[in-house]
Image: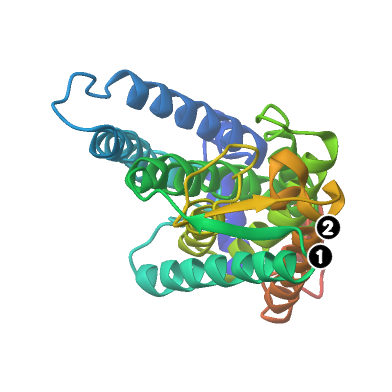
C-alpha cells in the first residue's frame, strides 16, 4: 500500500520536479548551493577587526559556517526524492560527543603506536599561543565544511542512486584526491587518506545517519594530531601542546605529510572504519542501489 501511494504521488509530480529530485541532479544542485554559500561566506568575512589572529579566525569561521549552515537548513535538506536533515538537533550532542571522543582515541592510539616503534618522539613543551587560530583552521572548519560536502551531499545522493558500497568507494576516493594538493602530499598519502579516513568517516555517517558523528570525529582527529601531539595535519605543520619530531622510514612516520600517510594510521583507522561499517550493516543501514530497490518494489511479492 505504501509503495502504491509513493508511486502515485511521484506520478503526480511535474516533470521538472522529477528531474530536480533525481538523486544525481539533486546532488549537483546541492553541491552548487554549497559552493555558492562557501564563496559568500568568504566574501562576507569581516576583515578589519580589532582582534588578534586567533579570535579573528574564530569570527571568520563562525561567519563561514553560519552561512553554509543556513543554506543547508533552508535549501539542501529540501532537495531530492526523500528530503531529510542530517544535522537534526535530536541526538546531536550525543553523536558529536561520541565523534569527538572517537577521533581523540583513534589518533592517540596511532601516536602511541608511532612512539612504541620509535618514529615519534616528544622533544619539549609546545607553543599554546596559536591553539585558537589552529583550532579553527584545522579542526572546526574542515570538520564541518568537508563532512557537509563529502558525507552530507556526495555520500548521501550517490548512496541513494548507486547504494552504500558505491558511495563509500567513490566518496573515499574523492576525499583522498582532494588532499593531493596539500603541502608535502604524495599519491600514497592521498591513497592513505582515502582508505583510512574515507572508510572511517563514511562508516560513521552510515552508522548514525547523522553528520554530527563524522564532523566530531574529523575535528577531533585533526585537533588531536596537530594541537595536542604536534603532528603535521595533512602535510601542514602545527603547534601542539608538546613539541615533537617524526623520524624514521616514511612508511612508519608518514614523512613530512605526517602520520596520516603512515601504515600505522592506515592499519588502525581502517580497522576501526571497517568495524563501524560492519556495525552499520548489522543495524540494517546498508542501502541497495536505486535500480535494485525499484525492481524489488515492483515485484509481485512486494505488493
Q: CA distance from mark 2 to mark 1?
A: 6 Å
User: Would residue 25 appear left or right of 267 to someone viewing this image?
Assistant: left
Asked whether the residues under the numbered discs 2 and 1 touch, taking CB atoms below 8 Å apart as contact, a structural biologist would say yes
Against 180, residue 100 (above or below) is below
Q: Residue at x 36, y 70 (%)?
A: 93
Residue 163 seen in the figure: no
Q: Nearer the viewer, residue 21 or 68?
A: 68
**Which residue does the image show at 70% across and 78% down from the upper left?**
279
Q: What residue does disc 1 label?
A: 267
The residue tagged 2 is 263
Give SS at disc 1: helix
In the image, residue 124 above or below residue 80: below
Image quadrant occupied by the C terminus: bottom right
Q: Residue furthest front?
A: 124
Q: Name the foreground residue: 191 vs 163.
A: 191
In the picture, measured across the screen, residue 283 lies left or right of residue 237, that is: right
Q: How many marks?
A: 2
Q: Is residue 149 visible?
A: yes
User: Which residue ends up furthest to the bottom in the rendered image?
Assistant: 282
Of the pair 197 and 12, the residue shown nearer to us: 197
Q: Residues within 10 Å of mark 2 (few under 14, many from 20)?
A: some
**Mark 1, other Cα within 10 Å: few <14 / some 14–19 / many ≥20:** some
The image position of residue 140, as x and y in percent, is 41, 48
Q: Position of residue 185 (x, y in %)?
A: 74, 33
Quarter of the picture holding the N terminus = bottom right
Residue 165 in the image: above or below residue 185: below
- Corner quadrant of residue 183: top right
Q: Residue furthest left?
A: 50
Amino acid at each position: 500500500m505504501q509503495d502504491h501511494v509513493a508511486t502515485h504521488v511521484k506520478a503526480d509530480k511535474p516533470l521538472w520536479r522529477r528531474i530536480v529530485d533525481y538523486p544525481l541532479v539533486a546532488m549537483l544542485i546541492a553541491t552548487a548551493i554549497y559552493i555558492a554559500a562557501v564563496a559568500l561566506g568568504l566574501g562576507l568575512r569581516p576583515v578589519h577587526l580589532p582582534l588578534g589572529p586567533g579570535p579573528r579566525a574564530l569570527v571568520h569561521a563562525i561567519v563561514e559556517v553560519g552561512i553554509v549552515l543556513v543554506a543547508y537548513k533552508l535549501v539542501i535538506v529540501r532537495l531530492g526524492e526523500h528530503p531529510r536533515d542530517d544535522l537534526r538537533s535530536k541526538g546531536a550532542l550525543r553523536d558529536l560527543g561520541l565523534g569527538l571522543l572517537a577521533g581523540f582515541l583513534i589518533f592517540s592510539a596511532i601516536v602511541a603506536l608511532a612512539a612504541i616503534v620509535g618514529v615519534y618522539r616528544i622533544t619539549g613543551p609546545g607553543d599554546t599561543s596559536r591553539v585558537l587560530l589552529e583550532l579553527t583552521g584545522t579542526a572546526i572548519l574542515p570538520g564541518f565544511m568537508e563532512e557537509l560536502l563529502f558525507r552530507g551531499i556526495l555520500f548521501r545522493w550517490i548512496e541513494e542512486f548507486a547504494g552504500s558500497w558505491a558511495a563509500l568507494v567513490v566518496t573515499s576516493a574523492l576525499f583522498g584526491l582532494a588532499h593531493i594538493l596539500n603541502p608535502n602530499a604524495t599519491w600514497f598519502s592521498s591513497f592513505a587518506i582515502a582508505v583510512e579516513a574515507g572508510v572511517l568517516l563514511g562508516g560513521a555517517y552510515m552508522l548514525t545517519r547523522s553528520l554530527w558523528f563524522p564532523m566530531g570525529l574529523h575535528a577531533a582527529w585533526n585537533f588531536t594530531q596537530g594541537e595536542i601531539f604536534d603532528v603535521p595535519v595533512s602535510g601542514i605543520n602545527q603547534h601542539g601542546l608538546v613539541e615533537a619530531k617524526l623520524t624514521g622510514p616514511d612508511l612508519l612516520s608518514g614523512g613530512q605529510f605526517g602520520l596520516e600517510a603512515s601504515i600505522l594510521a592506515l592499519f588502525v583507522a581502517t580497522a576501526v572504519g571497517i568495524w563501524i561499517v560492519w556495525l552499520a550493516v548489522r543495524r540494517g543501514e546498508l542501502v541497495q542501489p536505486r535500480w535494485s530497490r525499484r525492481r524489488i518494489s515492483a515485484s509481485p511479492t512486494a505488493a
